[in-house]
């Protein structure tokens, strides 16, 4: 289990290896924004503050969704964004919610 911290809610959850951030927080009864839960809507976008290297690499669906978000919101271009429904944990991570 790895500690994953949501700075926006000041809450830390222990998440299993290869469990998505969304699933880990849901298991702990902590609400994160979401929509489709398949990585194509972008509703669950988060900014990784620390531990990006502790997440599995984004797949093509997540890459395409993040690219579309950054193109639509240029102010996010330099942010380290991931989708909480797709980002799987392999170590400690700190993130915050992004409102778009």
Image (spheres, helix red, strand yellow):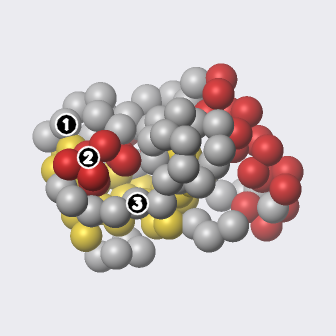
Percent position (x, y) of residue 91?
28, 40
Q: Is residue 40 above or below residue 78?
A: above
Question: Which residue in the structure is indicated by mark 1?
Answer: 16
Q: Residue furthest top?
A: 60
Residue at the image point whose x is 73% and y is 33% from the top: 64
Asked if the residue under mark 2 is in contact with the one under mark 1, i.e. CB atoms within 8 Å, the reply is yes
Circle nearer the N terminus (1, 3): 1
Q: Earlier in the sequence, mark 1 or mark 2?
A: 1
- The residue at which mark 2 appears reads as 24
Side of 85 where 100 appears, left or right: right
Instruction: Using the rendered image of the protein, determine whether residue 49 is visible from the camera's viewpoint.
Output: no
CB of mark 3 within 8 Å of CB of mark 2? no
Mark 1 Cα within 10 Å, few/some/many (few <14, many 20+)?
A: some
Q: Is residue 70 among the parts visible in the rendering? A: yes
State the residue in front, 84 or 34. 34
In the image, which disc is placed on residue 32? 3
Give the x, y percent position of residue 25. Answer: 28, 53
């Amino acid at each position: 289990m790895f500690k994953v911290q949501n700075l926006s809610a000041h809450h830390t959850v222990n998440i299993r290896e290869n469990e998505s951030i969304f699933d880990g927080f849901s298991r702990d009864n902590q609400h994160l924004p979401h929509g489709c839960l398949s990585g194509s809507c972008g509703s669950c976008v988060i900014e990784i503050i620390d531990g990006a290297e502790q997440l599995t690499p984004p797949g093509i669906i997540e890459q395409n969704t993040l690219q579309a978000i950054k193109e639509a919101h240029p102010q996010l271009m330099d942010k380290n964004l991931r989708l909480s429904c797709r980002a799987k944990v392999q170590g400690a991570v700190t993130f915050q919610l992004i409102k778009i």
